[in-house]
Image (spheres, helix red, strand yellow):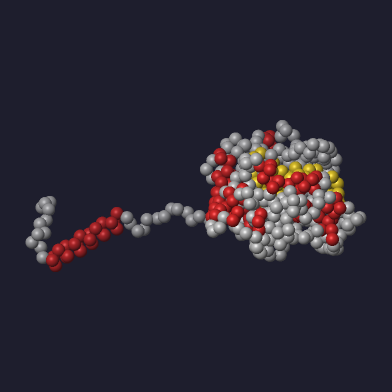
Amino acid sequence: MGGTTDYSDWSHENLIKRVTELEKELKDNTKSANPTNKKNFKKPRCEREFDPSKYNTRLIALKLAYLGKRYNGFEHHAHPTPLTTIEEELWKALNKARLIFPQGVNPLAPGEVNWEGCEYSKCGRTDKGVSAFGQVIGIRVRSNRPLPKPKAKPALEESGEGDAGEEENMHNTYPRENGIEVTSAPLSPSAGIPGSKGSDRGTFSLEDPEIQESLDFNHITDEIPYPQVLNRLLPPDIRILAWCPSPPIDFSARFSCRERRYRYFFTQPAFSPIPSQLEHGTSASKMKDGWLDIDAMREAARLYEGLHDFRNFCKVDPGKQITNFERRIFYANIEEVDDYTSSLAYVNGGSFLDESVRSKANGESKAPKVYTFTLHGSAFLWHQVRHMVAILFLVGQGLEKPSVVSELLDVEKNPGRPTYEMATDTPLVLWDCIFPHEDDESRTDALDWHYIGDTPGYSEGKYGQAGLMDDLWKVWRERKIDSILAGELMGIVSRQGVEAHELSGGKGGREEVKRFLMEVIVQD
């Protein structure tokens, strides 16, 4: 009865019939074991409505870095631009993280940038293509600090009058009623006096049981990790480096900044030199084509230091009625960048080296080297740094003497800017922004910066997997490979065909450029 059925004598038709019966039995058994009317108790996912009134806010400062080549500058403009701006990317990340919550804005598609209600301020407005490694913004954002329990309202408010306006105000990040916030002493002695902005936030008792939970909050370790949250949402070439949890009273990233530092990177030689035998019109007093006289550039750079009228070193914006062109430069110099290597071996050949470089090298130094024009100043005019660099390049090529800087700074003698080409944008970096106390002559930064990796519990945010350095490594590696491949290609081409020292003179040399600045003065 329970033995195995012998199918050896079954016909083909009977076997098919038997298989069909077994399949039907199996299907019926499966249905009975898994009834289709079983209820699904999983609730459908729905997006919870965000209630801004439940969250405290605080003013913080953020230090960020970005590579500007892919962006249309830092500042957002009302009119469309071919490339996005840094501010647009910050706006999208801040909204998506619900760190700000403008009324009527979809956090996943926040639309037009509008910083109203966020106490937003920015230090530098870098132009298209310009990078920054120390840009600073101030902004009021959502905080983890618990809100104190609301106090009983007067009878007039309980009747409903004024509620609509208060509810509408909850969509900004202004200080909440009875909210507690940590600030630092003002940078200016005149700030924070009674009656000034930020000094009338109200008083409270430390013994009040209603605010104990808010007082027990650690404003750093218990807070939202702002840099890490934003870095997960920002493009890889924009990164938050640090945050200041307690900016000074009346802090403004623009007006509290007392010093802005720039660096403009360039190579030595500035462009590919040609063999000596192909040059025309060279003399012992002129640098070899492509090479820069670094000593002359240093001499010219130092002439920028001090308080000067820089109207001949900027682009005048017709939309702004600027009457004061005086700016103070604290430091200006040409500095060599250490630890840079190059695969452009052909540049070190005898036919390509300038005589002054060959005599200083002693067979040890390799070209090309990398230098920066390092500049520290209180503030700068539109395109001022790039105009200053352009003049230094003319001095470095021997087309102008270092004294041309002093002549252009003399606006009585030269009241109009002469025509000259402005230096390109991508080598320029806003290196740092300094916020010292007003009476500090050393101009030491007074902000309490907390860099990624400093906060206990978030130490892996710098060197850990998917940390800041890991992100930057990917960005660096992509560009480094491009540099290596371009260098290898130049090396291959330089070794092909006739050797450089065997080439004879002809029409292949560059025509010597004659661009003396002071020949013609052209009014802007």
Q: Residue at x 56, y 40 (%)?
A: 463
| 288 on left or right of 457 | right
Which image quarter holds the C terminus? bottom right
| 26 on left or right of 225 | left
Q: Position of residue 380 (x, y in %)?
A: 79, 51
Q: Position of residue 145 (x, y in %)?
A: 65, 41
Q: Position of residue 424 (x, y in %)?
A: 70, 57
Q: Nearer the viewer, residue 500 or 395?
A: 500
Q: Residue at x 83, y 60 (%)?
A: 418
Q: Position of residue 493 (x, y in %)?
A: 55, 57
Q: Nearer the viewer, residue 44 or 293?
A: 293
Q: Residue at x 76, y 42 (%)?
A: 435
The residue lying furthest to the top in this view is 207
Q: Quadrant of residue 498?
A: bottom right
Q: Residue at x 60, y 58 (%)?
A: 503
Q: Nearer the viewer, residue 160 or 488?
A: 488
Asked if 518 appears above or below 224 in the picture, the reply is: below
Residue 267 visible to an observer of this rendering: no
Q: How many marks?
A: 0
| 124 on left or right of 459 | right
Q: Quadrant of residue 244?
A: top right
